Amino acid sequence: DTAVSQTPKYLVTQMGNDKSIKCEQNLGHDTMYWYKQDSKKFLKIMFSYNNKELIINETVPNRFSPKSPDKAHLNLHINSLELGDSAVYFCASSQAGGAKNIQYFGAGTRLSVL
Amino acid sequence: GEDVEQSLFLSVREGDSSVINCTYTDSSSTYLYWYKQEPGAGLQLLTYIFSNMDMKQDQRLTVLLNKKDKHLSLRIADTQTGDSAIYFCAESISDGQNFVFGPGTRLSVLP
């Protein structure tokens, strides 16, 4: 069974549209994350959720909104998509409670905004 | 703030050893990690080291940590073509929530 799964794997859409990316983990972890990887492969954290509370919110535009219906899911909703949003978005999860914080990653969602 | 640096590219011949270097700035880092990303895939944890250790070995992988210089390295012995990937160094600081990645080193293994 896949530990961290994201859907869709590929997403192609027009500027101005609203889209969502879903993430689910079956590891029983209590913290989930969204990362953005740009074309140069630089990886930046966007959000993390711990027990349904947002605990990190890096300076991302408020067009991006994470939604966590339960601790196994963290979805990413993006309003009014822009060209610069094109990237690969990775979901990850970890178990808090100690600094080891090993993060397990999904396979990524490649978003292309036309 | 926290910052993690790596050189962006490394090429080695098949069968040689690869050494990927990383420097970090946060002295309160408790764990440091190496992740591998193959083309079109997510990040996969390779190994990690606790900050009070100097070295950790796991089969072909050797991690060296110089805490004084804030320098971490990953040595891959007998590098194979399947090792071609991007390798990310990352640190987790004491609160366990902040996790910072380096820019990644693209390793190319030449036949």
Image (cartoon, coloured by chain):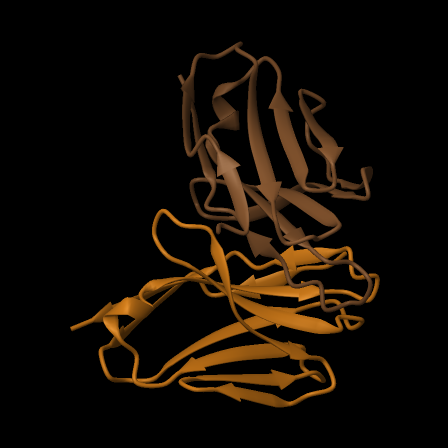
Chain colours: A brown, B orange
Q: In this view, does A113 lie above or below B29?
A: above
**Residue occupying the far front of the picture:** A1
Residue B92 in the image: above or below residue A84 = below
Q: In which quarter of the view is residue A91 placed?
A: top right
Name the residue: 54% across, 52% down: A3
User: Quick check: B2 left or right of B40?
Assistant: right
Location of residue A101 by image quarter: bottom right
Residue B39: image location, x then y, percent: 34, 51
Considering depth in this image, is A5 or B9 the residue closer to the camera? A5
- In this rendering, the count of numbered labels is 0
Residues B90 and B69: in front is B90
Instruction: Name the residue located 72 percent from the left edge and 23 percent from the top edge.
Output: A62
User: From this viewpoint, which residue is outermost toward the top?
Assistant: A16
State the image coordinates of residue A28 (x, y, percent, origin top left).
69, 52
Q: In the rendered image of this protein, does residue B36 appear above or below residue A56?
A: below
Residue depicted at x 45% and y 30%: A8
In percent of the image, x 59 and y 13: which residue is there?
A80
Q: How far from the left and from the top, in percent, is residue B45? A: 53, 65
Image quadrant holding the C terminus of chain A, namely top left
Image coordinates of residue A26 in percent, x first then y, are 61, 49
